[in-house]
Image (spheres, grey):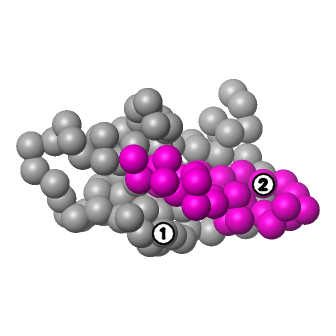
Amino acid sequence: MSPGSQAERWSEQYLQSQGLELVARNFRSRFGEIDLIMLDKTSLVFVEVRLRSSTDFGGAAASIDARKQQRIIRTAQQYLGGLTHTPPCRFDAILMDDAQGRNLQWLKNAFEA
């Protein structure tokens, strides 16, 4: 399993331990991919998982730049277009230093659409 896949599994397990339910993994559209789609009570949560072992270029949080955010937002809109009703939504990020989940940070509402 690649480090990125392992990081996504750790993130999924962590979020489930916090009470969220998995809806989908690696949802793809022509705009991009969303790593995890989770349900937090009545809110749909689109989760970007970022693994960065080095802070040379700003670390994991800095890697979710405006361009990446727009790709995630467009992919989320594509996902929502397939639903019969649109629930409340938010965009979260899980940041970690390595694929073993060290220094995991959960940023709720990491950015807005």
- Give 81 or 12, whichever is nearer the viewer: 81
Element class at badge 1: strand
Mark 1 → mark 2, Cα distance in angstroms: 19 Å
Q: Quadrant of the C terminus?
A: bottom left
Label 2, on which residue? 52
* Residues packed near mark 1 inside 10 Å, few (<14), some (14 to 19) or many (20 plus): some
Please say if 34 is above or below 103: above
Residue 48 among magenta residues = yes
Say what amino acid the circle numbered 1 marks.
Phe
**Where is mark 1, residue-wise?**
111
10 to the left or right of 21: right
Q: Residues within 10 Å of mark 2 (few under 14, many from 20)?
A: some
Residue 109: percent from left, percent from top: 44, 72
Q: Is residue 104 visible?
A: no
Q: Is residue 24 visible?
A: yes
Residue 104 covered by magenta stretch: no
Judged left or right of residue 66, residue 46 is: left
Q: Which mark is residue 28?
A: none
Name above or below for residue 22 compared with residue 103. above
Where, by quadrant of the figure, is residue 23 drawn? top left
Residue 60 rendering spot, x and y as whole percentages: 72, 60
The residue that appears at 36% across and 58% down in the rendered structure is 45
Q: In percent of the image, x 78 and y 54: which residue is there?
A: 52
Which residue: 24% across, 46% down? Answer: 80
Magenta region: 47-74
Nearer to the camera, 68 or 103: 68
Q: Amino acid at mark 2?
A: Arg
> Which percent across, then down, holds residue 40?
30, 62
